Image: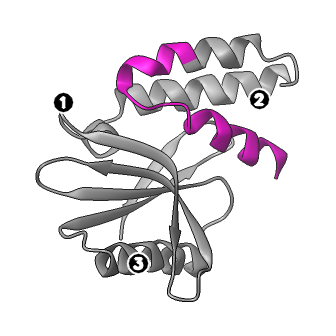
Amino acid sequence: MRWGNKLHAYLSLVKQKESVDYVKQLISDDIQLEDNEKQTFLRVLDNIKLNTHSNVLFGDERAVIKTEVEILDAEARSFRIDRMVTDNQRTVVIDFKTGLKEVSHKNQVMNYVELLLQTGYTAIEAYLVYISKEGDLEFIKI
């Protein structure tokens, strides 16, 4: 799904709430995107900035936000977490999905949590965020 991959790339640039407007400008200037894709992507970013789950996406003011975080399992297989937010109280793992809901998505995120627990992280929360073709967000706590 081309638009899903492109959207993931833009979402990886959103480190703080303040960077949303910058990423929106990048989208607006992207000549490779169709107008309808631009509108959807811009709506996604508006929804991220204004969402009631913004504390999940951005943490508190001292939170460390990382995107496209690579972790390895015991067999040196590589996994990539879309978004990881760490503050004084918790670590939040977020995986964005643009397709249909599948059980494998939950299993994927639970694998991330298990790998982080093995490396010493504690107090981990995990979310799947489904993004519709209209740009709406659905947060599912795992």
What residue would you read off at disc 2?
37
Vertical placement of residue 68 versus 107, above or below: above
Q: Which residues are magenta?
A: 1-22
Cα separation between marks 1 and 3: 26 Å
Which sits earlier in the primary sequence, circle 2 or circle 3?
A: 2
Residue drawn 25% across the image and 73% down it? 120
Residue drawn 71% across the image and 13% down it? 28
The amino acid beneath tag 1 is Glu
The amino acid beneath tag 2 is Glu
Residue drawn 61% across the image and 72% down it? 78
What residue would you read off at disc 1?
61
Which sits earlier in the primary sequence, circle 1 or circle 2?
A: 2
Disc 1 secondary structure class: loop
What residue would you read off at disc 3?
115
Cα separation between marks 2 and 3: 34 Å
Q: Is residue 102 left or right of residue 33?
A: left
Q: Which numbered disc, 1 or 2, marks the residue closer to the eye? A: 1
Is residue 26 shown in magenta?
no
Cα separation between marks 1 and 2: 31 Å
